[in-house]
Image (cartoon, grey):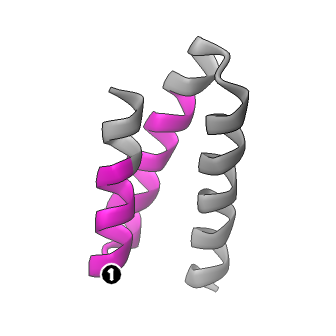
Amino acid sequence: MANQCANIGLLYKRQGDLNQAKAHLKQSLALFEQLGAKIEIEKVSNWLAELEKTKE
């Protein structure tokens, strides 16, 4: 489920819907944090940081 949320978030980002992208990536991050998946947490955190830069 966490991977699917991340993938959907990345698709929204490519389509230019940054609000939906952020929402799905945050949901993915929360799920990965619950699982303690350190590598995935780092990846999704980086994608969220890139998204914030895009918004500026």
Quadrant location of the N terminus? top left
Q: Residue at x 60, y 58 (%)?
A: 48
Residue 39, how many percent across, how many down? Answer: 70, 36
Q: Amino acid at mark 1?
A: Gly
Look at 59% across and 48% down and name the residue there: 44
Q: Residue at x 27, y 79 (%)?
A: 15
What is the quadrant of residue 21 in the picture? bottom left
- Name the side, left or right, on which 11 lies relative to 27: left
- Magenta span: predominant SS is helix
User: Label 1, on which residue?
Assistant: 16
Rendered view: 21 above or below 35: below
Residue 11 rendering spot, x and y as whole percentages: 29, 65
The residue range painted magenta reads 7-30
> Where in the figure is residue 53, as x and y percent of width and height?
67, 79
**Secondary structure beneath label 1:** loop
Horizontal relation, residue 30 to residue 16: left or right: right
Q: Image quarter for residue 9?
A: bottom left
Residue lying at the far top in this picture: please name it: 35
Drawn side of residue 1 relative to residue 31, left or right: left
Q: Residues within 10 Å of mark 1 (few under 14, many from 20)?
A: few
